[in-house]
């Protein structure tokens, strides 16, 4: 079994959208004999992209899985999304990979999502191979792309291949290990001699290659310095060790759509990237003691696995996809969900191959498999042996960037929306659904406009729910700036018992974020003790709708200082109304102002877009807090009013050609400038009149 595990590879394909990950996966599956034709994204017949939303947009939206065998190795590949809208799925999947192939486009070089993917691969300590794709396309520039890689991606790259030709004349590669040229005719490679016109380039690159290999191993360095020949076996050994230890990253090149260089990449995956054994033990937490414990990737260890993805399959029901870290399981059994502390029964075990699920008889360490219809299990849960329980910590979902208010087209379908969205939340942890207590709206938040659009399409396709999206209402608040003393007096006499409540209050502002404070300063029993809570309640209820535009009033202090009562006519209700009257009178007299939510944003953009971004932020009433360089990008930290940032995602995309990314979180409330405040107040009055 250990030999089988040693020959297993779990590989994530990572890149910026449009770099050719899915085309590469299709070429690999075709070469390995898994498919009998080379599927194409642009023709809608790829094995790895199959959801209607993916076919419509010609992009990967959800990580897809497949397996192949190549030269005695079994490889699980994960084709991950490269679009920022769906990048949460990428990081959720690659946390369970053992290695990665990072694609870089030979035309555009290293792009923002490539760097993001690289950062997460660093976080998960994944050994990597870089594949420079699209060498056959117009404007493909291999050495310029290589320079871009060296500048932006660390650790240092080590070149294994040099292309033969470029653009229309790209026809193969030279391997710097065996020093052979490989020319491709209809995807089949033919070894041949190195073309004479590139012999000098090859000799120079081979020298650099041997030097980097020698630097990574003391014994080889000694041989190299003494002028001794280094063998191909020694080169391969150090290349593997250096890649596994992340001393360097091998670089290969080719064309996925023309199937040039893909067989050599498949060889490199086998001999450069790690098996589960190379990755070592998986650390987790003992749920009973909180201690750190480990599981070795061995079949005789207690069973443990991590659920990193959930699919709502129309035929099989909910599919839970998990990576096994230790032990063996067979079909029809029970395992323990350590997070939910429940036993889960399962039936068949499946391998996910594109849109198909293939039943399997057994699964062990390193395997990525799926089971259907688990009742309690969701993404991020650990499945294990109950007597030897463990919890593996998963990556937190990325923060959402854009929000919409969502409502059904058909009245009365609110519950249907919640039910359908909760199913989609199982599948997509990057999606957030909340109900705003202040505005009473259902708010759906995601990674970008595309993410929300796809969710709406899935609601219609999978659950037959039609919805309307609108920008969410900004949760403004109100407060006071002045200190006042006012009386709230409620007196009603209409035959029989009357109503009487009289309260004098002092109102004053509190620091931002303090909320509401009530102080009882009554002396001498001018208001009986039993009526004082009613005054407070009246003030609190009245403050939910402020005097300016009906927004909640916050950050103020009320001191109940005086009053009077009637032995017969006074009641809790009368003092509650008196408190409410006092609040309204006091708020109007104490210089009321509107407050707006301020968001803290971090925007990462290419250097050349800095001027446009800062100008745009100024136009949105933003305050730039600082800037710092990050590779060839600049990171701008700023504070911006939420009202000005609700539709920022599409603007940023158009300003940066899709290369800018941002994160946003709530910071604090601030006073709205008078001219804008006036517009908001007028709009609120108009809405109230129309309502």
Image (cartoon, helix red, strand yellow):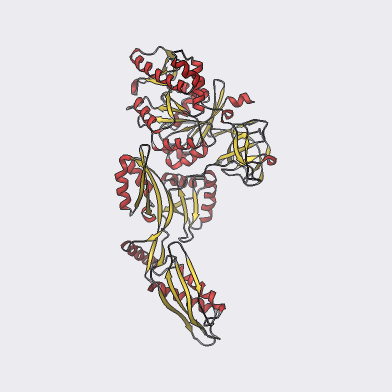
Q: Residue 666 appears at what percent x and percent y?
A: 44, 54
Does residue 490 appear left or right of residue 606 in this picture?
Answer: right
* Residue drawn at 35 percent across, 30 percent down: 107
* Residue drawn at 32 percent across, 40 percent down: 607
Does residue 72 appear left or right of residue 120 in this picture?
Answer: right
Quarter of the figure with residue 117: top left
Inspect this view and state whether residue 209 appears.
yes
Q: Residue 656 appears at what percent x and percent y?
A: 33, 41
Where 277 falls versus 193 (above or below)? Answer: below
Q: Nearer the viewer, residue 527 or 654?
A: 527
* Residue drawn at 51 percent across, 36 percent down: 124
Quarter of the figure with residue 321: top right
Does residue 410 appear left or right of residue 634 in this picture?
Answer: right
Q: Residue 642 appears at what percent x and percent y?
A: 39, 55
Q: Residue 638 appears at what percent x and percent y?
A: 37, 50
Where 236 falls versus 583 (above or below)? Answer: above
Pick the quarter of the image with the C terminus: bottom left
Does residue 555 appear left or right of residue 682 in this picture?
Answer: right
């Amino acid at each position: 079994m250990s030999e089988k595990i040693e020959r297993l590879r779990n590989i994530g394909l990572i890149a910026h959208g449009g770099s050719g990950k899915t085309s590469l996966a299709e070429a690999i599956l075709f070469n390995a004999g898994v498919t009998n034709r080379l599927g194409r994204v642009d023709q809608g017949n790829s094995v790895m992209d199959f959801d209607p939303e993916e076919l419509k947009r010609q992009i990967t939206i959800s990580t897809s899985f497949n397996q192949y065998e190549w030269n005695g190795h079994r490889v699980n590949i994960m084709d991950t999304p490269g679009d920022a809208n769906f990048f949460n799925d990428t990081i959720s999947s690659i946390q369970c990979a053992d290695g990665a192939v990072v694609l870089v486009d030979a035309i555009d070089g290293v792009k923002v999502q490539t760097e993001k993917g690289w950062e997460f691969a660093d976080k998960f300590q994944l050994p990597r191979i870089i594949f420079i794709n699209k060498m056959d396309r117009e404007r493909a520039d291999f050495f310029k792309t290589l320079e871009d890689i060296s500048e932006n991606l660390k650790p240092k790259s080590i070149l294994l291949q040099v292309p033969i030709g470029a653009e229309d004349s790209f026809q193969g590669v030279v391997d710097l290990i065996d020093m052979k040229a490989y020319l491709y005719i209809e995807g089949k490679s033919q070894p041949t001699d190195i073309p004479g016109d590139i012999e000098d380039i090859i000799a120079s690159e081979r020298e650099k290659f041997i030097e980097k290999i020698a630097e990574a191993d003391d014994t080889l360095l000694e041989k190299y310095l003494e002028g001794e020949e280094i063998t191909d076996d020694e080169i391969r050994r150090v290349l593997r060790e250096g890649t596994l230890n992340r001393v360097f990253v091998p670089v290969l090149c080719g064309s996925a759509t023309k199937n040039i260089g893909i067989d050599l990449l498949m060889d490199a995956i086998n001999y450069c990237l790690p098996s589960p054994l190379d990755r070592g033990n998986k650390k987790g937490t003992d749920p009973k003691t909180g201690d750190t414990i480990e599981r070795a990737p061995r079949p005789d260890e207690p069973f443990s696995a991590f659920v990193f993805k959930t699919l709502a399959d129309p035929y099989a029901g909910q599919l839970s996809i998990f990576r096994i870290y230790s032990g063996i399981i067979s079909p029809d059994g029970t395992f323990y969900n350590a997070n939910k502390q429940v036993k889960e029964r399962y039936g068949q075990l499946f391998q996910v191959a594109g849109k198909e699920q293939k039943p399997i008889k057994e699964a062990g360490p390193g395997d990525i498999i799926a089971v259907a219809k688990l009742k309690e299990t969701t993404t991020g849960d650990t499945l294990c042996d109950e007597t030897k329980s463990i919890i593996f910590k998963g990556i937190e979902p990325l923060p959402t960037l854009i929000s919409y208010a969502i409502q059904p087209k058909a009245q009365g379908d609110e519950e249907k929306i919640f039910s359908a969205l909760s199913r989609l939340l199982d599948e997509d942890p990057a999606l957030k659904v909340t109900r705003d207590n202040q505005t009473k709206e259902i708010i759906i938040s995601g990674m970008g406009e595309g993410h929300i659009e796809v969710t709406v399409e899935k609601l219609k396709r999978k659950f037959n729910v039609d919805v309307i999206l609108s920008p969410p209402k900004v949760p403004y608040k109100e407060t006071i700036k002045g200190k006042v003393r006012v009386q709230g007096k409620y007196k009603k006499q209409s035959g029989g018992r009357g109503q009487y409540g009289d309260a004098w209050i002092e109102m004053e502002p509190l620091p931002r974020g303090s909320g509401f404070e009530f102080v009882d300063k009554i002396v001498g029993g001018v208001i009986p003790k039993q009526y004082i809570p009613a005054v407070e309640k009246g003030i609190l209820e009245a403050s939910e709708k402020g005097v300016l535009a009906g927004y909640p009033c916050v950050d103020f202090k009320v001191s109940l200082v005086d009053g009077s009562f009637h032995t017969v006519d006074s009641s809790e209700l009368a003092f509650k109304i008196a408190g409410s009257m006092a609040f309204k009178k006091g708020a109007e007299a104490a210089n009321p102002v509107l407050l707006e939510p301020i968001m803290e944003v971090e925007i990462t953009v290419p250097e050349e877009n800095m001027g446009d971004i800062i100008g745009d932020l100024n136009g949105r009433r933003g305050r730039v807090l600082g800037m710092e360089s990050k590779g060839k990008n600049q990171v701008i930290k700023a504070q911006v009013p939420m009202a000005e940032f609700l539709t920022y995602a599409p603007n940023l995309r158009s300003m940066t050609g899709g290369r800018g990314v941002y994160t946003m979180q709530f910071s604090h409330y601030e006073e709205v400038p008078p001219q804008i405040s006036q517009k908001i107040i007028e709009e609120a009055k108009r809405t109230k009149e129309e309502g």
